[in-house]
Image (cartoon, grey):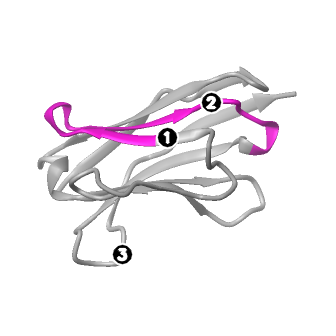
Amino acid sequence: QVQLVESGGGLVQAGGSLRLSCAASGRPISSYAVGWFRQAPGKEREVVARISWSGNSPYSADSVKGRFTISRDNAKNTVYLQMNSLKPEDTAVYYCAAKNPALAKYDYWGQGTQVTVSS
């Protein structure tokens, strides 16, 4: 099975940018569809963006569309989330997750990375 480790979180001012990385080990990440999720205190986890195993047709939630971009580099076994024009409401723990492309459920999760956006 695949193991996932997120990095790149931190504290940034509103309007700033961060790039999160999701590094895979154990199996090639090219075998999996990958999603980025976030969970803010007191709120449910929500999907932010997802990308197919091939990289086609990436999806971004309406709340981040035009600001966040998901991409993948299968040669580096890594998926990225570029976050621009950050807002205080983007503050959350961000998780990457992977799933078999034929299935609906994300079975493999990273430990999360904190993103804090100050106003």
Does 82 appear in magenta?
Answer: yes
Does 46 appear in magenta?
Answer: no
Q: Amino acid at mark 1?
A: Thr
Q: Amino acid at mark 3?
A: Lys
Rendered location of residue 110, percent (x, y): 39, 49
Residue located beneath label 2 in the image: 84
Secondary structure under the numbered disc 3 in the rendered image:
loop
As drawn, is 82 to the left or to the right of 107? right
Residue located beneath label 3 in the image: 105
Rendered location of residue 14, percent (x, y): 79, 26
Separation of residues labelled 3 and 1 (CA atoms): 22 Å
Which of discs 3 and 1 lies nearer the camera? The answer is 1
Secondary structure under the numbered disc 1 in the rendered image:
strand
The residue lying at 60 percent from left, 63 percent from top is 46
Q: Amino acid at mark 2?
A: Asn
Rendered location of residue 74, percent (x, y): 18, 39
Number of numbered markers = 3
Tell me the magenta residue range. Answer: 70-89
Residue located beneath label 1 in the image: 69
Q: Quadrant of the C terminus?
A: top right
Residue 36, labelled with which disc? none
Name the N-terminal-most of marks 2 and 3: 2
